[in-house]
Image (cartoon, rainbow, N blue to C red):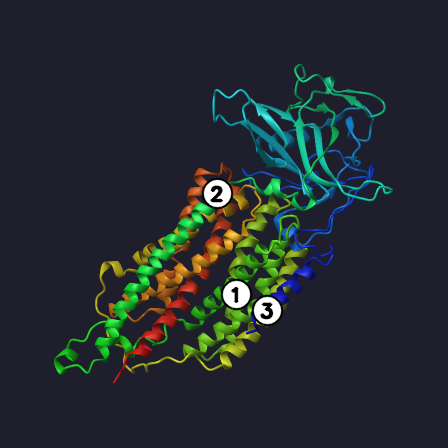
Amino acid sequence: SSSPQERLRYTLGLLVLLHGTDSFYVPGVAPINFHRNDPVEIKAVKLTSSRTQLPYEYYSLPFCHPTKITYKAENLGEVLRGDRIVNTPFQVSMNVEKKCEVLCNLPNKAVTLTVEQSKLIAERIREDYYVHLIADNLPVATRLEFYSNREEEEKKKEKDVQFEHGYRLGFMDGNKFYLHNHLSFILYYHREDVEESQEPTYRVVRFEVIPQSIKLEDLKADEKSMCTLPEATGSAPQEIDPSRENQLLFTYSVHWEESDIKWASRWDTYLTMSDVQIHWFSIINSVVVVFFLSGILSMIIIRTLRKDIANYNKEDDIEDTMEESGWKLVHGDVFRPPQYPMILSSLLGSGIQLFCMILIVIFVAMLGMLSPSSRGALMTTACFLFMFMGVFGGFFAGRLYRTLKGHRWKKGAFCTATLYPGVVFGICFVLNCFIWGKHSSGAVPFPTMVALLCMWFGISLPLVYLGYYFGFRKQPYDNPVRTNQIPRQIPEQRWYMNKFVGILMAGILPFGAMFIELFFIFSAIWENQFYYLFGFLFLVFIILVVSCSQISIVMVYFQLCAEDYRWWWRTFLVSGGSAFYVLIYAIFYFVNKLDIVEFIPSLLYFGYTALMVLSFWLLTGTIGFYAAYMFVRKIYAAVKID
């Protein structure tokens, strides 16, 4: 296969292609300079809720429309995430204050919501929906301040500031619904250095909103679309009664503040939402545990192996040979091909494909090329890479299939190219039908689905065939010992050699190493947080690979010592044991952290969890299998066999 430099250069080339539209600037898109009075466009992305997990597009609710609605052309990742970026009627100009302005086109006539629309809004407020807007590609955030009670005596209490993504659509009080109909935008700008003669230029560095609910009567609007905000104490919120028509005004105000945040670090507020110390602590913890265990394992394995090999290679007395036991006994059967070699090699091929994809994606993301500012880049890159990594998947699958005495290579290649992607596509299609039924923007539109199918059959399938062909033609892996004609009888096994016990034992170590990261990844997927700690993720991935290989080697050693030579499938299953723990953890997370109650959101959660667990099992199983295979070949090459 190609050298790492070539592969990296190729990945970068791919990314440049994906970013073809924007100029390629590593932490995201290039900065935009504004002069005073320049329009700053505010666009809407979507509505989301962590209770229903169904994103909706902005105009699915009766907000004010601009004269012409235009949707931004989107990349694959954005479509799959459910982003539908669209223009809004907010008129915001750089460094121009607005006290209060009515949004819809009529100057001071109230907007009337029909009963249907009121019902819909009340429903969305009950489901805890958030609205996501962007200004100059920066997502809106709501500032949450709470006092940290560190020292009660201190006069000036420290305020802890946290940010929420988007703003709440409304709130409930008892069983009444209130809509946030007035938005106070607070935008922060950074003044760029220019020559004296030139007009100063500004860049947007932060976008906050304070949503308020203000009753129609309290918003005094005049003919010029201006309005006056009431005094904070006496105003009543705008209620939405789902049983009748409601009258209200949509209003907004704009306030600009100068900030010393540089443009390059404007994403920091969004990304420092969670503790980094927890991460360091957990990583160091995992590293220590893993190194400790690897030390013990390698010591045990190397010492026992040395002893074994020395014993087996001694010119022994005739009596000793009579009661020979342990792994040398099964040397005539250890490389006997397993049942279903085609399926085994196909799954391992998909595992290799996943492994290459995840490795490259995490590495590139760690270098900062898939930052959250380029929305959907991560998903797009992952999809394309999975397609292109078909070459490696096919190559390894083909070579293994040849080693296992398989001869129907065309069928094997087809199996490799369709087995795992087919399952993924099937589950996603079924879930998509449910999302379609809910009219959510999270549903993948039909053209995108056709495009994905074309990519699968037009890019991935031929590449897998290509790799498989070369892998199948290559010299098979050489096994150091010959296989006997007649299979040996397997003695009765102890209870702890059971497959399921093996899975439970083998899964603990790798899962313990990545358990904390899993929490952050889950909250990124299910609670609309940003995930950006790819440096940590890369470390965790390395730890995962190391611990999977070790556990797998130990398990296969014990199995061969018990004179059970059917290790091919078993190693693959047992190494993926941590996927079982991931499943348990996902169920725990669902029960404790998410308040999902309805049927379709629960179905979505468990559907996507099943996909994650399956992929994780393939990944860890593949790593474990190759480690064990190398180990077995090494130890049998070391003993003299008459």
Q: As drawn, is 551 to the left or to the right of 7?
A: left
Instruction: Tell me the amino acid under the disc marked 2.
Output: Gln
Do callouts 3 and 2 mark residues in contact (Cβ within 8 Å)? no
Name the N-terminal-most of marks 1 and 2. Answer: 2
Question: What residue sits 46% from the left and 66% below the top?
Answer: 347
Amino acid on which disc 1 is placed: Gln
Q: Secondary structure at mark 3?
A: helix
Q: What distance separates the C-alpha of mark 1 from that of mark 2?
A: 33 Å
- Foreground mark, 1 or 2? 2
Neighbourhood count class around disc 2 (C-alpha, 10 Å): few under 14, some 14–19, many 20 upward: few
Q: What separation in Å lies between label 3 and label 2 (alpha carbons)?
A: 34 Å
Label 1, residues with CA under 10 Å away: few <14, some 14-19, many ≥20: many
Q: Secondary structure at mark 1?
A: helix
The residue labelled by disc 2 is 277
Asked if 574 appears above or below 88 in the picture, the reply is: below
- Residue 443 visible to an observer of this rendering: no
Q: Which mark is residue 487?
A: none
Residue 458 in the image: x percent, y percent? 63, 68
Quarter of the rendering containing residue 188:
top right
Direction right: furthest residue: 197
- Identify the element where label 2 is drawn: helix
Residue found at the very far bottom of the displayed protein: 642
Quarter holding the N terminus is bottom right
Picture coordinates of residue 278 (x, y %)? 46, 43
Amino acid type of the residue that numbered disc 3 sits on in the rendered structure: Gln
> In the current view of this chain or complex, which residue is farthest to the front?
196
Q: CA distance from mark 1 to mark 3?
A: 19 Å
